[in-house]
Amino acid sequence: MDDGMIRAEAVWPECELYIDALLAEDQEKRDERFLAHLKEIEAVVLRLLETEETLFDVRMRKKGICLAGTGSLTGKKFVDVIRQGCDDRCRFLPFVNDNPYVQAHHAAVEDLSLEDIDDYGPYEQVEKLNAAVTMIRGVLQSKAMREYLTKLDKAKQKRRQSAQTIINALRDKHARVEVLRLDLNYRKGKYVDLDDFAGALSDVKRDWARFRHDLVNGLYKPGVLGYMAKLEYGLLSGFHFHVVVICNGSKHWHDIQRAQMLGEHWKHHVVTPGEGRYYNCNRHKDDYRYLGIGTLDYYDHAKYSALVNLVVEYMIKTDFIMAAEAPGERVWFRSAHKPLKVAERRGRPRKFIHHDV
């Protein structure tokens, strides 16, 4: 074999790695666009529900040309979303339509053949677009749907109240705390496109039970005062936990290292080797405009406000997939040290009391 062939073979693995990196980057951007598309659908549909007016009509332009039009920004955004079209995954990826707002949009677009909206004349466009808006409003304002969404909102409010109770109690009791924020998840694709959602969920909750046991029993002696965790399911990420752990700030530990210890424990000691992943939010504190994690002193009103109004609000948001695929399952976990109220045993150590919602 000549030197030229040897050099070519030596370079080829680097080319493969470069191509793989490009493909991975392209897929990541495509995934981001897909999720942004679904969020935009939900936002537009929510805005459609804020008004009862007829949004579309036929308008006369110069030279007698008729065009479908709207004076509503919401109407314009609705048409934009329709014209953008859907990612193929809207049709074949499981659980996409567990979001009732997305489902209502998809049903209207399909039933009225709105994918080809520009192939119709102005009068037919107006008729179809107004019919789609009426259909979406009818589905989401029905009695059954209102009751369903109210039930989910009440569960969210209950999570908010329980989180605020823990935070306020620990703030009153401790002059300084360390707030750790991390996401516990799995390798990409592990729990996507599931055949047995219930079986996979059972495995995931066993992982959480194992992690929680280690956490409250003094994992790496982190001085844990309390925690909050929310189990969610992402269309492209599968099952994952958003976790906040509140530690005693007087022990002079570093929040970044503490969070890393917990993440590494999840990755190497709780989840099957090679299957676990985690994200340490404390390592990226500089990325947050309003900081509600890290060291919080009693008088850090801004930080406590960010913890309650940003960190907690993000955690407690409604997960439509879990609500639809596993109704009644516990998805919110929280716990805090609480002194036992036993008069004759005043010196008894605090017990870790669990509260699952």
Image (cartoon, rainbow, N blue to C red):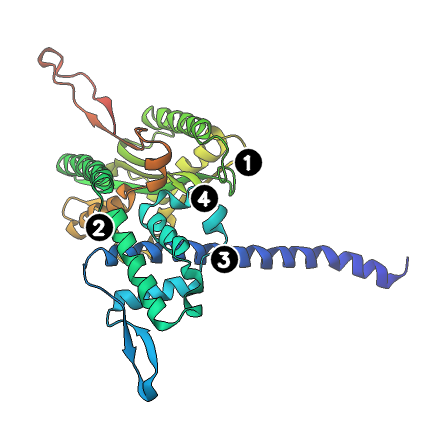
Residue 306: which numbered mark, if any? 2
Q: How many numbered markers are drawn?
A: 4
Q: Which residue is mark 3?
A: 30
Residues at discs 3 and 4 in contact (Cβ within 8 Å): no
Secondary structure under the numbered disc 4 in the rendered image = loop
Distance CA(mark 4)–CA(mark 2): 26 Å
Distance CA(mark 3)–CA(mark 2): 31 Å
Q: Earlier in the sequence, mark 3 or mark 4?
A: 3
Place of residue 28 in the rendered image (x, y in percent of width and height, measured from the top left)? 50, 55
Along the line of sight, which residue is nearer the eye, 246 or 198?
A: 198
Secondary structure under the numbered disc 1 in the rendered image = loop
Residues at discs 4 and 2 in contact (Cβ within 8 Å): no
Secondary structure under the numbered disc 2 in the rendered image = helix
Residue 274: which numbered mark, if any? 1
Amino acid type, residue under disc 1 in the picture: Gly
Amino acid type, residue under disc 3 in the picture: Arg
Place of residue 188 in the rendered image (x, y in percent of width and height, measured from the top left)? 51, 43
**In which quadrant of the rendered image does the C terminus lie?**
top left
Position above or below: 248 against 29: above
Distance CA(mark 4)–CA(mark 1): 16 Å
Q: Which residue is mark 4?
A: 237
Q: Earlier in the sequence, mark 4 or mark 2?
A: 4
Amino acid type, residue under disc 4 in the picture: Ser
Residue 128: which numbered mark, if any? none
The quarter of the displayed image where residue 15 is located: bottom right
Q: Earlier in the sequence, mark 3 or mark 1?
A: 3
Q: Is residue 295 visible?
A: no
Image-based side of 203 in relation to 230, left or right: right
